Structures are given as C-alpha cells and as structure tokens.
Image: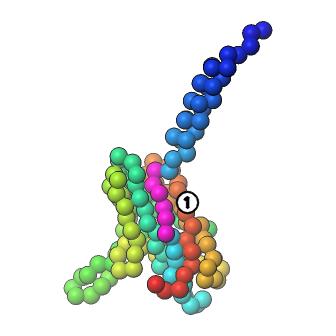
Amino acid sequence: MRKPKPLAFLLVATLSLIATSLKAQDPVVLSEGWIRAAPPTSNVRAGYVVIHNPSHQGVRILSASSPHFRGVEFHQTVLEDGMMRMRAQSELQIAAGGTLRMQPGGVHLMLFEPTKPLVVGEELTLDFHLYDGQRVSTLLTVKRGL
C-alpha cells in the first residue's frame, strides 16, 4: 500500500476549504435589525433591518417569516393625496452592490400578531425567503421607539 503524498493531501484540504467558504456565503448581508416596542395589547409591530447585496447580480426577496409572529409583510410609506399611507409590497428587490435601509417613514416590515408578549431588549429571529429558494436569517432586537 502506498502512502499518500503530503502535497496531494494539502491540495485536497485547501480545495475543500475554498468550496466550503464559497458555499457558506449568504446572498445578502443583514444588519441593524430592530422592532419598535408597543403596548402589549397591540397586534401589529413595525420592524427594520439593513439589507446589503454584495453580489454582482440583483436579488429578489419574496417574503419574510418569523416564529414569533403569525404574519410578516413588506410595506412602504408613500405620500398620496397629501396623506401618508402604507402600501404592501409583494417583494423587495436589491440591486447588485446595493443596500436597502428599512426605516420609519420608508420601507419597513409589518409584523402581525406576536405569539407572546415582547420585552424590550429581547432578540427575535426573522427569515427572508429569496427567489431562488434560499433563506437568510437575522435577529431583530425589541427597542423603545427611535
């Protein structure tokens, strides 16, 4: 039986590490996630997150979900007939190299029917579901209104 060559082993190990690191890269980078605290009787909360697309291709986010809420929707605040209104968005599109900063008065998450009372400082999981079947998760921290 022949002994494996150290160089061959090193090459296989290096290629394996490269493949693993390429596969593990998320299509979008999520940061600064937070939920605005509200009275415990409120069935709806607003949430915000920064979404960055580091790739050279646009990304479509089709939906979001959380085990902490019965429903999650994308909304945008728009000025219509002199009044600010919220409009549901069917999806979010992030251009290649682009960033979407969800914020009050702009694009945001509507989080419906919390499954339990929310506590300031608590971190809750949120999943974004992408056009290609991938799922990217982040944490949203419950904060007093900012």
| Residue type for callout 1 | Ser
Please say if 6 is above or below 143. Answer: above
Q: Residue furthest right?
A: 1
Task: Assign a secondary structure to mark 1.
Answer: strand
Residue at the top extreme? 1
Percent x, y for residue 72? 50, 70
- Residue 146 in the image, given as x and y percentages of width and height: 46, 84
Placement of 43 over or under 20, stated as above or below: below
> In the image, is residue 29 above or below residue 141?
above
Q: Is residue 144 magenta?
A: no
In front: 1, or 40? 1
The answer to whether residue 75 is visible is no
Q: Quadrant of residue 95?
A: bottom left
Taking the view exactly as shown, the residue that stands out farthest to the front is 6
* Percent of width and height locating residue 132: 45, 48
- The residue sitting at 59% across, 24% down in the picture is 11
Q: Which of 134/48 is in front? A: 48
Query: What's the magenta region?
Result: 27-32
On screen, residue 41 versus residue 133, left or right, reads right
Dot 1 corresponds to which residue? 137
**Does 137 appear above or below 39?**
above
Q: Position of residue 28 (x, y in %)?
A: 45, 55
Structure colour scheme = rainbow
Q: Residue at x 35, y 47 (%)?
A: 57
**Magenta stretch: includes residue 30:** yes
